Image (cartoon, rainbow, N blue to C red):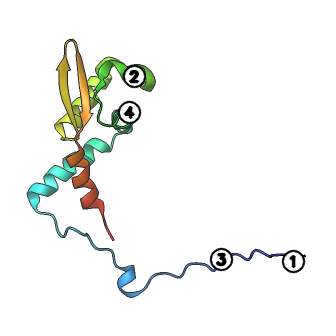
Amino acid sequence: MSTTIDTPAAPLEPATGAEACCTLSAGPVNSVDAERLASMLKALSDPTRLRLLSHVAAQGCTSVCACDLTEPLGISQPTVSHHMKKLVDAGLLTREQKGRWAHYSVVPSAFAELRAFLDIA
């Protein structure tokens, strides 16, 4: 019968040379793109908006009624409307009025743009 002894892995050495450099894969951002990206990032900087966005994004391609967001998040309808307006204005969500209620959907291209910008390798 043999026994195996687990030895801890060697600590990772800091990267050197080209591996240590971080580069923005898309290159420098012009002023128009910087304004648009800053607007999106600013909208995402609020915890309530992040929670709202996560509820909408969890539905995939299906739109979400504002009426379905108040109870799970424990916030009032006016608060939902306020924060959703900020996300729509930033281009992260679309809003469609269906009768009395607004329905929201994610704008995939906005998140693709953010992902490309944040892809620092």
Mark carried by residue 75: 2
Q: Report helix, strand or loop for mark 3.
A: loop
Q: What's the residue type where badge 2 is placed?
A: Ile
Residue under label 1, please give it: 2
Instruction: Tell me which label, 1 or 3, sits earlier in the chain.
Output: 1
Q: Which residue lies furthest to the front in this view?
A: 1
Precedes in sequence: disc 3 or disc 2: 3
**Given this view, does label 3 or label 2 mark the residue nearer the observer?**
3
Lower position in the chain sequence, tag 3 or tag 4: 3
Which of the two discs, 2 and 4, labels the residue nearer the N terminus? Answer: 4
- What's the amino acid at mark 3? Ala
- Judging by the rendered image, the residue that carries numbered circle 4 is 55
Secondary structure state at the residue bearing disc 1: loop
Cα distance, mark 2 to mark 1? Answer: 60 Å
Q: Quadrant of the N terminus?
A: bottom right
Look at mark 3 in the image and give the residue it sits on: 9
Where 87 sits versus 75, above or below? below
Q: Distance between the residues labelled 3 and 4?
A: 39 Å
